[in-house]
Image (cartoon, coloured by chain):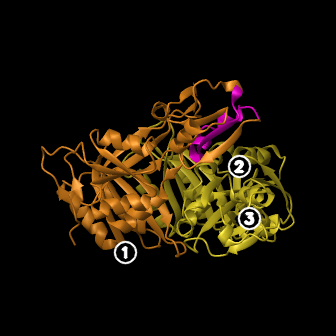
Chain colours: A yellow, B orange
Amino acid sequence: MAIEMKLLDNPEAFPVSGRIACQGIKGAYSYFAAQKMFPQGKEIFFKTFDAVFEAVKSGMCDYGVVPIENNSYGSVKAVYGLLEREHVYIIRSERLLICHQLMARPGTEMKDLTAVYSHEQALGQCSGYIKGLSDNVRVIPSLNTAVAARYVAESKEAGEAAIASPECAALYGLVPLNKHVQDSDNNYTRFVCLSREPLIYPGANRISLILSIAHKPGSLYGILGKFADLGINMLKLESSPIVGRDFEFNFYIDIEAQAANEKVRKMLEEIQVSCPEFIFLGNYTET
Amino acid sequence: MAIEMKLLDNPEAFPVSGRIACQGIKGAYSYFAAQKMFPQGKEIFFKTFDAVFEAVKSGMCDYGVVPIENNSYGSVKAVYGLLEREHVYIIRSERLLICHQLMARPGTEMKDLTAVYSHEQALGQCSGYIKGLSDNVRVIPSLNTAVAARYVAESKEAGEAAIASPECAALYGLVPLNKHVQDSDNNYTRFVCLSREPLIYPGANRISLILSIAHKPGSLYGILGKFADLGINMLKLESSPIVGRDFEFNFYIDIEAQAANEKVRKMLEEIQVSCPEFIFLGNYTET
């Protein structure tokens, strides 16, 4: 069975505009990822990832932008779950370096600090800095960093601050109290662009797959052997338990390969035949 | 180089008591996992996972109990990071079925509901139910489910509820408003017991490893070949980017095997020699 894909011609360039579905609010990291991919795009915001996928499937939006993995927190399982069920494709990927700052309304000083708001993951990524704050400072989790920044901007309470991106400070009129609050400077999130169609732009060199593999010794070994035969590097490999079935897994696999290459397409078809479930998520460029 | 491990004799049974380091507060899921493993143990609570590991390493506590993976949210990366750095061992594992209920102070009725508190992951796991609530009900993330339950128990505000475990309701004097609020009934978290010593109890059949593998085609393939040769099943396989180095990975690998078997020990030593980094996390029983 041929794998559905649409190889685009050589001069075809990635679009710069369109209606882009994002989860969250203006100033969330998804928003900045969408802006980088589509400099002239129009972002449309949805509360949940489900709604973003639905907007792409229904055609309400041209594309969707969602986070797929973070180097500290791993894969975004909810997004993988939707990729498995919803038959949309990845057509591009963008790594965003995450940079957190402590910010407050103009006039607030460090000595006035009473509370810090941020997303729980951001609080975790700044835990070393937060430990050094006075015991009187309350630490309060928010739904995301942009919500935290907006809340602090609109609040009337004195001494409140948010941990969010520098772009968020600008967006909500906050000023940085401290620009270096995260424990590691190597903190990035990879975002993917979703499309209804399995478009493959010239130069695409990352292929993403979801496979379920028989639970017996050597099943995965046989598949990795096919990659090794063609000298293909793996970029990601992750087992994920299948809900409701004990000790059965899906594998999330990314490889460095081009579907434009006939040998690669043939290999993918062989894997498709050998696996109970095979989902081709796309072949795309990572920037 | 021999791998450090301490195979215990046949009649040796897993202990039932000791000082057990847990993250969180009484009523957190870690607490119930610790109680299941050590029915006569004394739990000692710490704010962070770091502090739990430190308590085990220093001897302040005999054992530690921490979550290592959830079937919806994946591996707990912070715990894997500590396992990689802190030289403690896994000596047992316990799967806990996670069951969420909506609970409030006695006398509160559904029609009075104004706010729901819970840990963000729990809110995510109940998102279908929460969507069905009135738009007037505020949804507020807490640090964990037990903190949410305790907050609601101590609050003076009318109409507040928490999403937490049934055991938490009993612990904090709350009553269930709704017992079926989570989207999937197959929601479990695996907890591991940490020890300073690499103790291997009789019957242990799960081996956990952290490996770093050269980033070239076929590296992982060679290792999986060794498992296949001995007919060993894999229980987990996950690539995790190494912070600060692009496109280099650690692999978290669990296999179904017994270190008491000499062939298995020999195979582990071969893998140790072939990998830039090799960490034997333990050989233990999963219940």
Determine the chain carrying the residue at label 3. Answer: A
Amino acid residing under circle 2: Val
> In front: A181, or A68?
A181
For marks 2 and 1, give the one nearer the viewer. Answer: 1
Q: Identify which residue, A97 or A259, lies in the foreground.
A: A97
Q: Which residue is mark 1?
A: B276
Graded by Cα atoms within 10 Å as few (under 14), some (14 to 19) or many (20 or more), the crowding at tag 3 reads many
Q: Relative to B166, is B65 above or below?
A: below
Q: Position of residue A32 (x, y in %)?
A: 76, 65
Q: Say which mark, if any, is on residue A88.
A: 2
Upstream in the sequence, badge 3 or badge 2?
A: 3
The amino acid marked with disc number 1 is: Pro
Q: Are marks 1 and 3 in contact (CB under 8 Å)?
A: no
Which label number is shown at residue A33?
Answer: 3
The answer to whether residue B115 is magenta is yes
The residue located at (17%, 55%) in the rendering is B7
Magenta run includes residue A167: no
Q: Quadrant of residue B134?
A: top right
Q: Are marks 1 and 3 on the same chain?
A: no
User: Residue at 76% of width from left, 52% of height from top?
Assistant: A197
The chain that hosts pointer 2 is A
- Name the chain letter of the residue that bears numbered label 1: B
Q: Which residues are magenta?
A: B112-135
How far across and how far down the image is residue B276, in percent? 37, 75
Q: Are marks 2 and 1 in contact (CB under 8 Å)?
A: no
Q: Mark 3 vs mark 2: give the one in front.
A: 3
Q: Quadrant of the N terminus of chain B?
A: bottom left
Percent position (x, y) of residue A95?
66, 68
Amino acid at circle 3: Ala
Q: CA distance from mark 3 to mark 2?
A: 19 Å
Q: Would you identify the image quadrant in which residue A118 lies?
A: bottom right
